[in-house]
Image: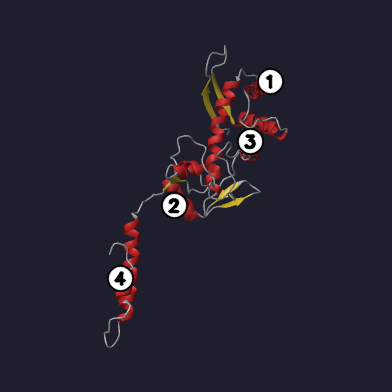
């Protein structure tokens, strides 16, 4: 039996209203958009509104519907959410990926334990994932973009401007999130202290006295002859 999803049109589009998405319709949408990716027609920011309208036209012709481009766009939000869940599940340490059947496999023990606390993941485990290859074509190549998308081989960066302000960014630029809501990276504080020259001189002098006292330690407890000479070299003594 085909799975269905009911969505509503956003905005005023005449006869367009409630639409029931069947599994076959979803397959048509994803297949059409995967074809655009293969042809290199998708932009770096994703699909354009014209692509959604073209996809809607294909649906309307094939299924005799009145689907709008916005309805297609809204429907894609669900498939992208599914792809994000699938990608996370594939990274489970106990999961095995079956390429032939597009199935994320868990042992009975791990499956029961995982689904006990993550019930929403159950439909995507130990069962073939529908439309996997089309979703992989559409979403699998879409990584982080922009100035925060750096290679994992990047070195730790130190910003000179931050250093002047007493802060140095010591966070490695590996997989930084482009989400503006993400918490800012913590920065290491640099403390710029100032010591009085007299204090420095006294410290050095006391160090010399300590070394002289160490030399004086012996069986006869004799005071070294140069002890006074060492002490008298201290400034303002």
Looking at the rendered structure, the secondary structure element under dot 2 is helix
Q: Is residue 65 left or right of residue 117?
A: right
What is the distance, in whole Å, between disc 1 and disc 3 at their CAs?
23 Å
For disc 4, the neighbor class at 10 Å (few under 14, some 14 to 19, many from 20) is: some
- Point 45% across, 43% down: residue: 164
What is the distance, in whole Å, between disc 3 and disc 2 at their CAs?
32 Å
Say above or below: 38 vs 21: below
Q: Is residue 30 left or right of residue 185?
A: right
- Can you identify the residue that label 1 sits on? 61
- Point 48% across, 54% down: residue: 110
The mark lying in front, picked from 3 and 4, is: 4
What is the distance, in whole Å, between disc 3 and disc 4 at their CAs?
79 Å
Circles 3 and 2 in contact, beta carbons < 8 Å: no
Looking at the rendered structure, the secondary structure element under dot 3 is helix
Circles 4 and 1 in contact, beta carbons < 8 Å: no
Q: Which mark is residue 231?
A: 4
The mark lying in front, picked from 1 and 3, is: 3
* Mark closest to the chain's N terminus, 1 or 3: 1
- Point 33% across, 80% down: residue: 215
Looking at the rendered structure, the secondary structure element under dot 4 is helix
Name the image quarter holding the C terminus.
bottom left
Residue 76, image x and y in percent?
57, 30
* Mark closest to the chain's N terminus, 2 or 4: 2
- Can you identify the residue that label 3 sits on? 138
Residue nearest the viewer, comparing 115 with 195: 195
What is the distance, in whole Å, between disc 2 and disc 4 at their CAs?
74 Å
Circles 3 and 4 in contact, beta carbons < 8 Å: no
* Mark closest to the chain's N terminus, 3 or 2: 2
């Amino acid at each position: 039996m085909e799975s269905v999803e009911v969505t509503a049109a956003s905005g005023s589009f005449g006869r367009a209203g409630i639409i029931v998405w069947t599994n076959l319709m979803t397959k048509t949408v994803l297949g059409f958009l995967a074809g655009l990716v293969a042809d290199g027609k998708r932009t770096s920011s994703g699909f354009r509104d014209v692509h959604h309208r073209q996809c809607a036209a294909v649906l309307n012709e094939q299924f005799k519907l009145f689907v709008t481009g916005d309805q297609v766009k809204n429907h894609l939000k669900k498939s992208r959410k599914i792809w994000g869940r699938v990608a996370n599940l594939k990274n489970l340490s106990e999961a095995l990926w079956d390429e032939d059947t597009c199935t994320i496999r868990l042992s009975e023990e791990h499956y029961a334990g995982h689904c006990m606390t993550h019930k929403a993941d159950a439909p995507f485990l130990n069962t073939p994932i529908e439309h996997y290859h089309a979703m992989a074509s559409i979403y699998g190549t879409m990584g982080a973009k922009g100035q925060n998308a750096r290679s994992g081989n990047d070195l730790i960066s130190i910003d000179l401007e931050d250093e002047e302000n007493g802060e140095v960014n010591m966070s490695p630029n590996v997989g930084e999130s482009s989400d503006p809501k993400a918490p800012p990276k913590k920065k290491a504080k640099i403390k710029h202290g100032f010591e009085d020259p007299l204090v420095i001189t006294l410290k050095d002098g006391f160090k010399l006295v300590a070394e002289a006292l160490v030399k004086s330690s012996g069986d006869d407890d004799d005071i070294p002859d140069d002890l006074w000479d060492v002490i008298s070299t201290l400034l303002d003594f």
